[in-house]
Amino acid sequence: MIDKEVEKLIHLEALRHKEDLNLIASENYPSKEVLKACGSIFSTKYAEGYPKKRYYEGCEMADEIETLAINRAKELFNCDHVNVQPHSGTQANMAVYLAVLNSNDSVLSMRLDQGGHLSHGSKVNFSGKIYNFNFYGVDRETEMIDYDEVEKQAKSVNPKLIVCGASAYSRIIDFNRFSKIAKSVGALLLSDVAHISGLIAGKMHPNPTPFSDFVTTTTHKTLRGPRGAIIMCSEKFKQSIDKAVFPGIQGGPFLNMIAGRAIAFKEASSINFQKYSKNVVSNAKVLSEVIISNGFRVVSGGTDNHQFTIDVSTQGYTGSEVATTLKKIGIIVNKNGIPYDKLPPKITSGVRIGTPALTSRGMLNDEMQLIGNIISEAIYSRDDNKKLDSLKSRVKDITEGFSFPGYD
Ligand code: DSN
């Protein structure tokens, strides 16, 4: 590379990933093929519109690559129509809202501080400013979605749209029940499966498409593709969704990312990806069990998917302190609120842990056993620098044996 400054930063970022244990639940390592497509010549092309209906000339290959991505996604998730153009998960949700809501319409979604997402109606997000969001949460005791409560809320607020799906929820989501609740009040259902779409593709979580009017997902989390998102819907909403994405909220699609998405969809339909998804869930289970056996409380008592949240408040710590401590020894997590958290989002009582990235590096249950014990010991000895140094070298011993696709 001629630009040494950028080259150095790319190298250091790759090194950081190699030497750290990345347990951020929303991150992953796409394949080399996906990375190559994202940096390909398709990044130069303007192709506003949709295949065969473009506003630019020279879109023959663009049409083919977008059609390929659409068809692969349709097959993978078994749905009628897919829009593969959204630049992000928030934009995918924005397009759904634009397609079916008017400003001030009533929507019911999961509370952000109990596992929801900013774009599900947070007051600081466009969604909370434009639409009238009401919220459901989790049961205080079980810390799982209380579907009877959702139903009660739906009857009381009479929403035009119900949003299910979460950023920090470790249990199986019952899409069928959500669909019945939505139908009972005449609402549409949007399932935002950004976190779990890879597990759905890998057959480790039920598929929401038969039960939902709209399904949105980012493509870079458990699905292990490039950054960006897609929207799935039935034939009935095809036109309004496509119009909402372009020209509604976006201009030209990022065809390089769409090419990367096409590859990721093919990869995610393989038997190997099913094995990967199984390992992601099994790794999360083992990791949470080790941490629980070391005296910690995990929200809802465990996990059915790729992530879980440790409540560190029972030991008198905050999420922010623990995230900083773990960073010192090369374990990367994010502080995260727990349901009914008394602490603000910048401090929190929890840390969220996810296994998609480490599983992509090839780590299995044996590594999770080691990592669970290292995490626990680090939290207990957060003021003991000597101990933290020795834990850091144990982290290094683990990372040395495992690479990832973008590391050369
Ligand atoms: N902020 C992402 C996450 O970490 O879950 C979701 O957009």
Image (cartoon, rainbow, N blue to C red):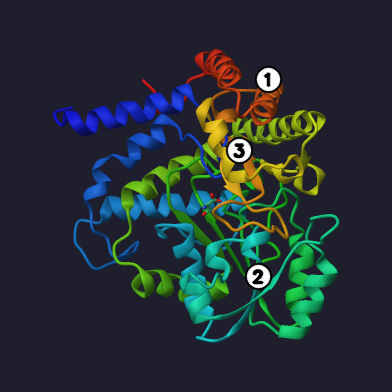
Q: In this orientation, which residue lies closer to the viewer: 230 or 368?
A: 368
Task: Please give the name of the residue rendered at 79% of the width and 56% of the height, measured from the top-left corner.
Answer: 144
Q: Secondary structure at mark 2?
A: strand
Query: In x, y percent, where is residue 229?
Result: 47, 55
Amino acid, disc 2: Ser
Disc 2 vs disc 1: which is toward the camera? Answer: 1
Disc 3 vs disc 2: which is toward the camera? Answer: 3
Amino acid, disc 3: Val
Name the N-terminal-most of marks 2 and 1.
2
Q: CA distance from mark 1 to mark 3?
A: 18 Å
Residues at marks 3 and 2 touching, judged by CB atoms closer than 8 Å: no
Q: CA distance from mark 2 to mark 1?
A: 38 Å
Give the quarter of the image for residue 173.
Answer: bottom right
Q: Which residue is mark 2?
A: 109
Amino acid, disc 1: Leu
User: Alpha-carbon neighbours of circle 2 within 10 Å: few (<14), some, or many (≥20)?
Assistant: many
Query: In x, y percent, where is residue 329?
Result: 53, 25
- Residue 370 disc label: 1
Name the N-terminal-most of marks 1 and 3.
3
Name the N-terminal-most of marks 3 and 2.
2
Query: In x, y percent, where is residue 82?
Result: 50, 60
Name the image quarter holding the N terminus.
Answer: top left
Q: In this orientation, which residue lies closer to the viewer: 235 or 343?
A: 343
Task: Please give the name of the residue rendered at 51% of the width and 71% of the height, measured from the top-left corner.
Answer: 96
Q: Which residue is mark 3?
A: 322
Query: In x, y percent, where is residue 330?
Result: 51, 26
